[in-house]
Image (spheres, rainbow, N blue to C red):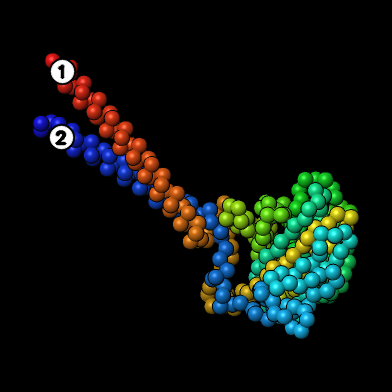
Amino acid sequence: KFEREKREMEGRRGNMGLVKVMVAMMVVGLVWGGSDQPAYAADDHLAYYVEDLSFYPPFPLEGSSLRIPGWEYGGDSLAFEDRVLLTSDVPSRNGWLWSENPIGLSKWEGIFAIKISGKNRLFGDGLAFWATEEPKVTGDVMGYMNKWKGLGVIIDTYDNNVDNRHPYLSVVVNDGNGYWDHANDGGSLTRYGCRIKPKFRNKGVLQVVVSVFESHIQVLLFDEDNEKWYDCVNVSGNHGNKFVGNYFGFTASTGSVSDRHEVLSFELYDMKRMEEDGGHHEHASNAESSADGFSFFGFLYNLVFYVVCIVVVACAGYFLVLFIRTKTEKKKKGPII
């Protein structure tokens, strides 16, 4: 009897050891699982929100038309309560949305949400975000003028070169001399950019963060399906005060192929003031593999997932140990006479 109780106690200790190992695995998994979550949280920036250059739905109705406070839209664009439609899914359309006041910040961060959708197998041309000297000038670069002065974040969705890298996002700082070769997908001006990984067309919203620091410009993209921020591009250079006095804008165009291009929101943050308050930090250089942010829903998802895993593995381990111990005891007892 004493030997049997001793073996049962050892079996329970073995089971508890298994549980401890599973708990340790769960904790490690939560730590690593949290690293897969978005590396960016705009909630940290709320105190530095620049309201007069931002917009967010619902948009107010003034008279018989909707107005975007601090912004003006034109061309083929239309405003709705929850979005600005830059182009319909119709060929040969150009639409624009520009800030009424110039940029007064040397270091800033803009977060915008867009949607691109359409019914055709071939589609284009694309959408762009600008911080340039001359607003409301139409042209052949996603509806804006060529050889612009300032910053362009250009999302090109039509693959003229058939190089299979589209949709492609380019970051272009132009001094007024750089020429966007439309037939060649921008040509040499697209050397800083990335292929957009999230499959956003006809699926959902694409969120983009454009951060302008003194030493570089960084662009992050959010993948809704995988809840990850992707570090798209970093452009080095002296960018301090370079875009002060310029205007923010969004443009889109369609050619022989078309798409529906929509802008949902734009949030601007004063990064210089945030830096002065000691709260500024630049984002991880590779948000895809080294995210440093925290997502409550991502954490909750990981927690539930690992709890379920530990319960399943612990139960399986317990019954396996119980089965082996029972067989061992039967062998020791020998046959019943």
Q: Position of residue 220 (x, y in %)?
A: 65, 60
Residue at the spot of label 2: 6
Q: Is residue 145 above or below residue 221?
A: below
Question: Could you tell whether 153 is left or right of 329 in the image?
Answer: right
Residue visible at 36% across and 47% down?
24
Residue at 66 percent across and 53 percent down: it is: 198
In the rendered image, the vertical position of residue 270 relative to residue 332, given as above or below:
below
Q: Residue at x 38, y 45 (%)?
A: 310
Q: Is residue 316 above or below residue 292?
A: above
Residue 209 shows in this picture = yes
Q: Nearer the viewer, residue 227 or 91?
A: 91
Q: Which mark is residue 336?
A: 1
The quarter holding residue 8 reads: top left
- Residue 167 position, x and y percent, is 75, 53
* Residue 136, label in figure: none
Q: CA distance from mark 1 to mark 2?
A: 23 Å
* Residue 265 drawn at (x, y percent): 68, 70
Kindly state the secondary structure of the residue where label 2 is placed.
helix
Indicate which disc, 1 or 2, sits on the residue closer to the N terminus: 2
**Secondary structure state at the residue bearing disc 1:** loop
